[in-house]
């Protein structure tokens, strides 16, 4: 998966289209991410203790990775992610790069 925790993303599809946020959690096996404060759903919670009232909570639901684009930290544009192999002391490392400006993400 090309998007990781801490990345800034732009939602390109759905009810939050055009909004930006930070990735809080990623689920690579399900190909989903959770974005801070976006794709909120209402969750009804039962009272736990006697005398306590139930609550309705707003919780961020997971989004599919195909519905977001990563924002390049350098050029600030929504972009696709590419990879570039860089060899350091005989070991090769895979770096994520911006497809628009070729800078390391």
Image (cartoon, rainbow, N blue to C red):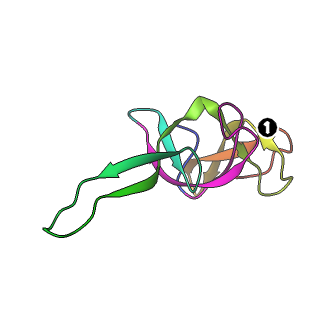
Q: Please, is residue 14 above or below residue 45 in the view?
A: above
Q: Which residue is more in the foreground, 38 or 58?
A: 58
Q: Position of residue 39 (x, y in %)?
A: 56, 44
Give the side of residue 61 with respect to residue 80, left or right.
left
Residue 90 in magenta stretch: no
The local crowd at label 1, few if under 14, some if 14 to 19, many if 20 or more residues have their Cα within 10 Å, is some
Whole-percent x, y for residue 8 in the image: 67, 54
For the residue pair 1 and 48, the one nearer the viewer reads as: 48
Query: Which residue corresponds to mark 1?
Result: 99
Report the span colored magenta: 6-28
Mark 1 element type: loop
Q: Residue at x 79, y 42 (%)?
A: 78
Residue 74 screen position, x and y as percent: 82, 57
Residue 37, quarter of picture: bottom right
Q: Quadrant of residue 18?
A: top right
Vertical placement of residue 67 versus 26, above or below? above
Displayed quadrant of residue 57: bottom left
């Amino acid at each position: 998966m090309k998007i990781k925790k801490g990345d800034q993303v732009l939602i390109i599809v759905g009810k939050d289209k055009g909004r930006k946020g930070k990735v809080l959690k990623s689920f690579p096996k399900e190909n989903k991410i959770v974005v801070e404060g976006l794709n909120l759903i209402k969750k009804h919670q039962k009272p736990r203790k006697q005398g306590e009232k139930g609550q309705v909570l707003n919780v961020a639901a997971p989004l599919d990775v195909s519905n977001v684009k990563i924002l390049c930290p350098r050029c600030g544009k929504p972009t696709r992610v590419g990879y570039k192999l860089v060899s350091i002391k005989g070991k090769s490392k895979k770096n994520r790069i911006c497809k628009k400006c070729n800078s390391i993400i």
